Amino acid sequence: MRNVYFQKDFFNLKELSEYSGLGIRFLRGALKDPKHSLPHYRINNKTIIVSRIAFIAWLEKYELNHNNKIDTIVNQVMDEMKQSIRQTKQ
């Protein structure tokens, strides 16, 4: 059944939840997020649909770049080691 979702261009919230693995409650909250709201359409002031392409673009804004975090951690450790070595030499 999941393969059917890859062929759809628009999802209601239940389908989007099944497609993405995110909870409906989370998705409803994302619709109202003032800083980074999930793009959607409201039909007849009731039915909410979300474009698959818009959802993927929205989701990609949350991507973490782990390389930057690792670099930061390594740099911090290296700085601490350098300080420690300087202190032992004095």
Image (cartoon, rainbow, N blue to C red):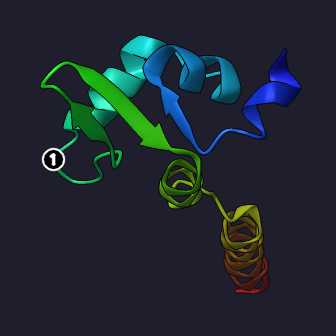
- Label 1: how many residues lie within 10 Å, few (<14), some (14-19) or many (20+)? few
Q: 2 or 85, which lies in front?
A: 2
Quarter of the rendering containing residue 81? bottom right
On the image, the x and y values in percent for residue 26 come to 40, 21
Q: 66 or 29, which lies in front?
A: 29
In the image, 82: left or right of 15? right
Residue indicated by mark 1: 34
Query: As displayed, is residue 8 above or below residue 4?
Result: below
Quarter of the rendering containing residue 84? bottom right
Quadrant showing the N terminus: top right
On the image, the x and y values in percent for residue 66 come to 73, 61
Number of labels in the image equals 1
Query: As displayed, is residue 53 above or below residue 47?
Result: below
Q: Residue at left 80%, top 27%? A: 4
On the image, the x and y values in percent for residue 8 come to 67, 38
Quadrant showing the C terminus: bottom right
Q: Residue at left 29%, top 52%? A: 36
Under circle 1, the secondary element is: loop
Q: Residue at left 23%, top 31%? A: 43
Which amino acid, by three-letter code, is at mark 1?
Pro
